[in-house]
Every structure is written in structure tokens, then in C-alpha cells.
Amino acid sequence: MQISQKQLDLVNDRIRALVEAGSFYGKKLAEAGITHVDSPEDFTKLPFSEKKDLRDAYPLGLMTAPEEEIVRIHSSSGTTGTPVIIPYTAKDVDDWAIMFKRCYETAGITNMDRIQITPGYGLWTAGIGFQNGAEKLGAMVIPMGPGNTDKQLQMMQDMKSTVLCSTSSYALLLAEEIEKRGIKDKIHLKKGVIGSERWSDKMRERIHNELGIELFDIYGLTEIYGPGIGINCPGETAMHYWDDFIYIEIIDPKTGEPVPDGEMGEIVITTLVKEGAPLIRYRTHDLSRIVPGKCKCGRCYPRIDVIMGRTDDMMKIKGVNVFPSQIEEVLANFDEISSEYQIRISHLDGKDTMRIYVESTGDVDFATLSKKIAEKVKSRIGFTPIVKVVEIGVLPRSMKKTARVIDERYD
């Protein structure tokens, strides 16, 4: 996807604002001797921006609009290191709501839906992003926020919620609780809008089957507005993104060079009209690819594939580079196990050990299943893990994101 002239004009407008504000990126441009881009080739010479740049700008070094125009700040949900503070103008908040409204509309959600929002509010962008978009759509919002599963299920029944907004982990937890309590016939959900963490096909299938709802993958990150910058359309897995607000390129994470459409790489995002904290060529570390060609739904917005993982997900074990998605792919071939798994890496007696915990029903032989899984994983990654099969429900469930990889080597 080559950047268009219209998008270049918007980039130049943001460059002017960044230079005038004397932001970190304005200084990077001055060092690179760039104040204007005239062509797609010029654009690829612009320096990248990184999470570290944003952390170094703490607290308000990213503020590009005058302070009297800033109406809100948000912060990334990361638990380590200096937080990233993103300022928003009133126009930024409204633009974000417009994008989110498009997401709901793409999923076939209307102003007659009742939308139950379970992600967190406050500094995190999730809850309020889901709410702003739903209000812009004119739907009824049930702003529950996270936790209190009893109350969530009570409201879901009494308010006859038709749309669930949540992380995949919490959607699964709710699905299991609904099954356990035998209240499926009292639930009116039709659709689920799921965001904030990558989820496997197996998990998607399980939530879909247990809740009987159509599921949609919403994309976004705090640094770039928040959730709502892209969503898949019915029956498709690829996500449309709103190229009048953001420009997406896919690069080789090692070389930083753009890759051809259709090839996997790292998502890099440029905000085209953001005022409070515009970002140019921001490296997200999310792995995906541009899906070429027009979608059969008829929408003209370009598409990226599902998020395959992150460049920083990689684990180095016994000298081998391993990605959680590789383990996930192997586990997906075993019908005997649920979608839940956990990887624990430890260092014992001078060597690395990887343990994989999976859940299964009591009607299979755990020892035989463990051996089969271990053999398949070995053929995929080159060494044998310790596989432990536990009963369904033993592994932790989360109301937020589920920690699937726990590295105990550095505790």
C-alpha cells in the first residue's frame, strides 16, 4: 500500500505541527534534515518513532497542540517502565469516536443494540473508547467496566444486552460461567467485539460455540487513539482500517525496510490528523500483513490480517528462538484439549526448562496425551518440553489479559 498524495499532504501538516512544538520527533526531523515530504520515497526516509521515545517524553513531552486545547490524557496499560502519556484534543476524541462508530457499523451493530462494556475505564483507553463509539452510534451503553462477574451476568440478563465488548480472556470466563450456571437461555447476546490481546482460532471457536455469538476482532493501541482503528467484517478475518485517519505500512522488523503487500512484517502506523500527540512511522511491534485486493464486502478501506504476535514475544530457550504462536499452532491440532494453555520457563540445574500446561477433560489418559503433545512440540521447535495435562478450569482465568508465558528465569 503506497502512501497517496492526499495522505502525504496530511503528513506534511503534522510535520509542521511537530516541528513548531519542538517535540522529540520535530528534533529527529531536524537532525535528519527533513521538513517536508514530496513522494512515497521521501516518506520512507522519515525516521521511525519508538516506544522508548514516548517514554522519554514523560510526562507531557508528546503534547503537540497548545495546552488550552488538550481535554484529556490516556496512558498505556503496560505494567513495566515509565508510562506513556498521550494527550488528546476535543477533535482527537471525536475522531476516535467516529472510527469506533465505523467499527460497530462494520460489525452490523446498530442504535437498537444494547452494548455491555467490560474493559477498564480510567487511564486505559479501552472502556471509554468502546463507550464513545457506542454513544456516537446512538446505541444503549451498559458501562460495567471490569470484574464483578455476578453483577455482569445479572445486568446481561436484566438489560438483555445484545453486544459484549471485552478481552478474549474475559469473554471465555463469562462463557464458562454462563454454562456452569445454566443461564444460557436467559442471555440475549448476538455479537462480541473483542480486543486488547491476540487470541487463537481455538479460543475464538470456543467462545463462539459456548455463547453462540458472532465475534469481531477490534484493533488499536493507546499510542494511536486506542481500540477502534480497525475491525474485521462479517465472515472475514482480515481487518479493515481507516486510512483517512491512519496510514499503515509493513516493514521487515530486522532491516526496517518496507515489505511487499501480502508479506508478514511489523505494523508501522502514522497518524494523519491527530492533534494532541501525532505520531509518524510508529513501530508497534505487532506482526501482520497487508491483505491485497478488494474485500468482497465492497468496502474500499484497506485491510490487515489478524495480529500474528509481536516481535518482542520471542523467547530464547536452550539457544532456540521460540514464539508462543508456534506452540499455539501445535496445540490447535489436539481436539482433546481446551483453548487454554500456559508456558512456564525456568532455569534448573544449569539448564533452561520449558513446561507447557494444557487442560483436558477427565475422559482421556493424561500421561499418553502429554507424551503426544511433547513429541509434536519437539518436531516443531527442536527440543522436548515438559507437558503437564490438567483438568479443565485449573489454569487461571482473567478479567483482563491472560498471562500465557511466565518466564521464571529472571525472578
Image (cartoon, helix red, strand yellow):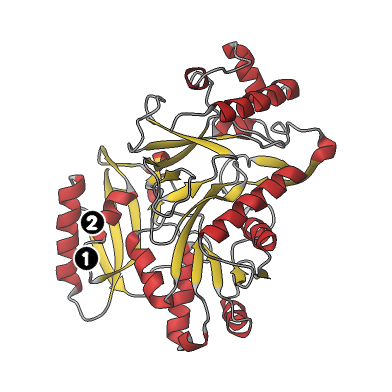
In the depicted structure, whether residue 287 falls above or below residue 325: above
The residue labelled by disc 2 is: 330
Position of 201 compared to 114: left or right? left
Per the image, label 1 sits on a secondary structure element best described as loop
Give whichever of 99, 200 is nearer the camera: 99
- Could you tell me residue 351's position as x and y percent? 26, 44
Query: In what quadrant of the picture does the N terminus appear?
Result: top left
Say if residue 89 shows up in the picture. Answer: no
Residue that extends furthest to the right in the rendered view of this protein = 68
Could you say where residue 405 lies in the image, as x and y percent from the top left? 39, 53
Q: Position of residue 323 (x, y in %)?
A: 32, 46
Residue at 14% x, 69% y: name it.
368
Identity of the residue drawn at 40% across and 27% down: 258
Mark 2 packing: few (<14 Cα in 10 Å), some, or many (20+)? some
Dot 1 amino acid type: Phe
In the displayed structure, would residue 357 be above or below residue 142?
above
For the question of whether residue 94 can be seen, the reply is: yes
Report the residue marked by disc 1: 334
Camera-nearest residue between 342 and 168: 168
Residue 401 in percent (x, y) is at 49, 59
Q: Residues within 10 Å of mark 1 (few under 14, many from 20)?
A: few
Q: What amino acid type is highlighted by mark number 2?
A: Val
Snapshot quadrant of residue 246: top right
Instruction: Name the element at disc 2.
Output: helix
Q: Residue at x 53, y 66 (%)?
A: 399
Q: Is residue 354 left or right of residue 22?
A: left
Q: Residue at x 51, y 17 (%)?
A: 42
* Horizontal arrangement in the rendering, residue 139 relative to residue 163 (left or right): right
Are circles 2 and 1 on residues that touch, CB within 8 Å?
yes
Q: Residue furthest front?
A: 298
Image vertical order of residue 375 relative to residue 273, above or below: below
Measure the alpha-carbon separation of dots 2 and 1: 8 Å
